[in-house]
Image (tube, rainbow, N blue to C red):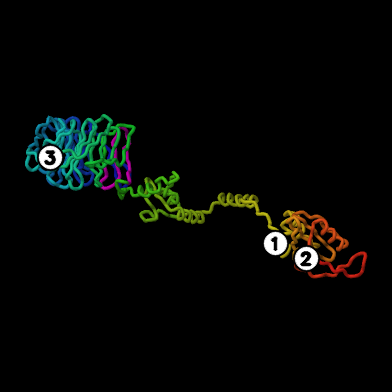
Amino acid sequence: IRLYETAELGLKCARRLAQEAIDAIFLGDDYKKLAILGSDRTIEFHAQYGKHHTLRIPKFGRNLQYDRNTCMLYVTSSTNEIYRLDLEEGIFAAPLLARNMDFVNASALAPNGAPLLLFGGSDGQVQIMDTREGPSAVASGVQAPAEVRSVAWSLPDCLQVAAGDISGRVTVWDIRSSRPLAERDHRNGVPVHTVQWHSRGVLCSSDSRTITFWKPDAHRSEIVTSIPSKTAINSVALWPGSGIIFAARDEPRIGTYFVPELGVAPEWCGFLDGLTEEMEETATGAVTSVYDDYVFVTKKDLQQLSGADSLIGTSLLKAYMHGYWMDRRLHDKLVKLSDSSTFSLAEHEKERIQEAVDAKRPMRRPAPKQVAKPKVNARLLEKATSESAKQVLEDDRFAKLFSNKDFEIEEVREGKGGFGFFVRCAFTVYFIRGDVFSRGLQLGSLSSMVHEHKSSSGLRQTNKPHSSKKVLDKGRRTPVKVAK
């Protein structure tokens, strides 16, 4: 027998028995008083220090139930007798007799404190007996399809009862009627060994293969969830008012499950609520964790982080397994404080080398330098490539072409719908057609250039007259007035 302490999430103690344990029940609020039903017709009573007393019953026992109000222990057996042990007086009381039954397999006391004992056994019979009146039955004759292996009361009103039989079927009745309220077949062909009600009106029924949670309804029974198992399940226990489920199986480990729909996690494992909320699948199917921003540390790690073990018990640390969850930002601060107090030459040398490597190998390529946008003739600069435009801007001979208003290019529509450009100046003329320089830099007679450009490109006069300038021709000394 192994006893676990929930506060520490670990093993409390372990004991050995001389025989196989059929059933066990706590006689108090803690582990100090325990009754164990053995396969050799014995009942062992254990205290905090170990085995306290052993007694033998006349027939092989099947199930244990303890009434704390009267200190009475009920033991169902392979006969129609239900043995009663008065633990306050230390004597056997007169047994209760199950009518029309050859044996009784399972029993359950009303959880609301009423002196009612529910039991079921052979021939599919389920009966309710008043423990104060002895053998007189309050209700009988309610029959299940086959031999009953487990029974349970509904919570919290105890107005419904459920029974599981050896054929794998679970039947629910209202105690005010003998007609079944709901039925469900596990369809596994094995007996239902555990039936237990949850506080939210959900019924837990289990056989050796699956654990099923469903809501019994007169019209349609809705399944909440089903938990399969690779190994045989022997028994199932629910933590009251929560979604924690324990399953005893044919293996050393106890199967522990958490169903958030049934309730929140108990206080001793409250971290499960945060984990399950962030582990739900999103619309894209991605799964995230709420503890991505936390660091798991042990008690030894806290002692090394500048004495951070003083934070144990505060809201800054969340207990989990054998350590704690700490916020990553707080952990980084404590690490820096710890590193400053304990200077490491090796770490400093490693950081210095890394900084030197990063300086020689930048993470990103430098962005190309943009050519400064000129004040005038911006469209002329766009027609050229970036490299040629850069050379023109850097050349002092063409600086005024993109800064002086007198060298501004005026657009003139051509005969075919295109655009032509020309620059009128004293000694330097650019002719552009489309996006290609037609002449480049030319020196000479301006009048002949204008005449040549007008004849080749179909240049025409605009409506707006251009201001005249005095231009010197090589062949003549008289000023010439040039119109656009």
Q: Dot 1, how many residues are within 10 Å of its Cα: few (below 14), some (14-19), or many (20+)? A: few
Residue 378 in sight here: yes
Q: Which mark is residue 419?
A: none
Q: Which residue carries the number 1 mark?
A: 373
Numbered circle sitting on residue 128: 3
Query: Which residue shows up at 92% across the image and 69% down it?
Result: 477
Say which quarter of the image contains residue 196.
top left
Tell whether 287 sits left or right of 113: right
Dot 1 or dot 2, earlier in sequence: 1
| Cα gap from disc 3 to disc 1, whole angstroms | 98 Å
Q: Mark 2 — residue?
A: 407
How busy is the neighbourhood of tag 2: few (under 14 within 10 Å), some, or many (20 plus)? some
Which amino acid lies under the numbered mark 1 shown in the image of this protein? Lys
Residue 247 falls within the magenta-colored stretch: yes
Residue at image position (46%, 55%) is 329
Q: The magenta stretch spans which residues? A: 238-260
In the picture, the quarter occupied by the N terminus is top left
Residue type of the residue flagged with mark 2: Phe
- Using the image, determine if residue 336 lies above or below residue 447: above
How far across and how far down the image is residue 320, in percent?
37, 47
Image coordinates for residue 304, horizontal then vertical, percent: 45, 51
Amino acid at dot 3: Ile
Q: Nearer the viewer, residue 379 or 41?
A: 379
Q: Position of residue 327 (x, y in %)?
A: 43, 53
